[in-house]
Image (cartoon, rainbow, N blue to C red):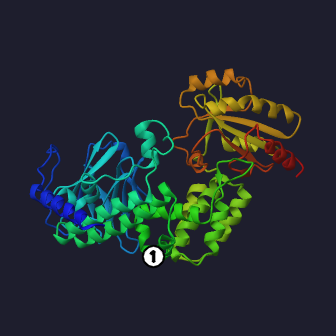
Amino acid sequence: MKSIHKQFFLILLTSIFFFCSPKQESDFNNIDYQENNSDSIFVKIANIDSAYIPATFIGGKKFINNNPKLLVVYNDSIEGKILFSENFNIKLVPKETGIYINYGLFKTEYYYPEKGDTLRIVYNGNTPTLEVINKNDYEYNVTKYIDSKIKKPLSFTEFLLVKSRTPKQGEYLSSREDYEKYYFQYNYILDSLYSQKKITTTYYNNVKKIKEIDFYNDVLQETHNLSDVDHKKIKNLIKVDSLLKYPNYRYFIKSFVDNLYSIGFKGKINSQIRESDKGFNAVFSSKDFGEQTKNYLLFYYLEDILKYYPVKTADLYKERFTTLKNKDIINYVKIINQKYSFDKSTNGIILKSINRQTKSLDILIKENKGKIIYLDFWASWCLPCREAMPSSKKLRAAFENKDVTFIFLSIDKDFDKWKSANAKEYLEFFKNSYIVANQDTSMEFKKLGLESIPRYLIFDRNGRLIYKNAPSPEDSETKEILNKLLTK
């Protein structure tokens, strides 16, 4: 970069610090902020809906319930505690704790609190923002501060949202050079802040590493132009397990490995099923990753397999996963068993018929023991679900006199809307058409991982779920699978 750029930044930084002054207290005087002279860190939360309290542990991270925008991450080797009081205040007692807040599209605040800090997290609707009341903006959110001084290249997704259209030829794409320029400018200001002792060494080192990862991620996602030098540096990075504490690194490593091993989509069953088996196999055999990083990636691919692959296949990969004997694997297996073990517990799936009579899915499956079950999750408002109904009718007709039971389960929240759509789809008098009555509270429903509908499941003659993501009624493979199962 030419010296003129450095002169420009020197002038810019001089003006920045000339006008920087400790920030004034904003209008949140209703919260009790005592001076913090202790060895602890206090976090005050304002305007938060009580439904988000208390916090729960998920996979070693801690989320406010129903609001993953607020994420507290502990260094795996350090113990820490979060305690909630009735006033939604948090007391942190860690040696190193990172707080990450997504406050807008592609905008993330990250801060490593220090002893004596008092953090304020204020909600505007469902969006949190972070303040550290004893520090200036750049001391706790340097990225937001620097991005107010320089302009980051526009990503493809941001372009779509801003312009409400796809870019015309030659109109958009941010180049690798654009990102190199932006990160050079960013690091220049960051280094200057640090040299003037405006930010702490711990914060500086964390941000420096985070922005290095961000550069590789932006270049990979937006330009698909990682150089040989990039690959060599990344190969060194993926051996450093301590980087897993950074959410942006966890996102990057998954994207990088998907790209490295050309993980695409597969299947006649569903074009949206990723080749997670291919990713799992490649990582399992690789010696390029640190142990914790390797475990994390295997868990990432295994979760996808457990959600979308046939149960028999998923069981085989789960068995391979458990052969890696270490602390991480033991913890991951506990998570898997909690999330994906379909054990028909007392907190099962409760169904309601058109006559408002209730029955559990467990009982319904038992009533059809000896038959193959093809289960269809749908809703009145789901257009693809409704479009598939004629094909579903034809499929039912094709197996009318065979040992195949068809079950329709709606996830509508409005009973009357379901009842009306049920009639329009000629399911009003169909024996096995129900609405799910407890989808918000049933653990078994959540374990099915219904992230989108329509979704189809197949149970064998013994009532065992063997296809968590079966092909749709219009897919010719559906008939092949059902006919094959009938011969067993």
Residue 415 in the image: above or below residue 122: above
What's the residue at 83%, 42% (across, down)? 479
Q: Which residue is mark 1?
A: 240
Quarter of the figure with the N terminus: bottom left
Observer-nearest of 133 and 318? 133
Give the image location of residue 22, x and y in percent: 11, 56
What is the tally of numbered marks visible in this picture? 1
Helix, strand or loop under label 1: loop
Give the image location of residue 172, x and y in percent: 45, 46
Residue 487 lies left or right of residue 308; in this view the side is: right
Observer-nearest of 198 and 224? 224
Residue 426 lies left or right of residue 321; in this view the side is: right
The 10 Å Cα crowd at callout 1, few under 14, some 14 to 19, many 20 or more, is: some
Give the image location of residue 38, x and y in percent: 16, 67
* Residue 476, picture quadrant: top right
Residue 376 in the image: above or below residue 8: above
From this viewpoint, is residue 60 visible?
no
* Residue 182, picture quadrant: bottom left
* Residue 240, picture quadrant: bottom left
Observer-nearest of 440 and 162? 162
Residue 113 lies left or right of residue 35; in this view the side is: right
Give the image location of residue 216, x and y in percent: 44, 64
Q: Amino acid at mark 1?
A: Val
From this viewpoint, is residue 270 visible?
yes
What's the residue at 16%, 70% (across, down)? 197
What's the residue at 36%, 73% (across, down)? 78
Residue 250 in the image: above or below residue 369: below
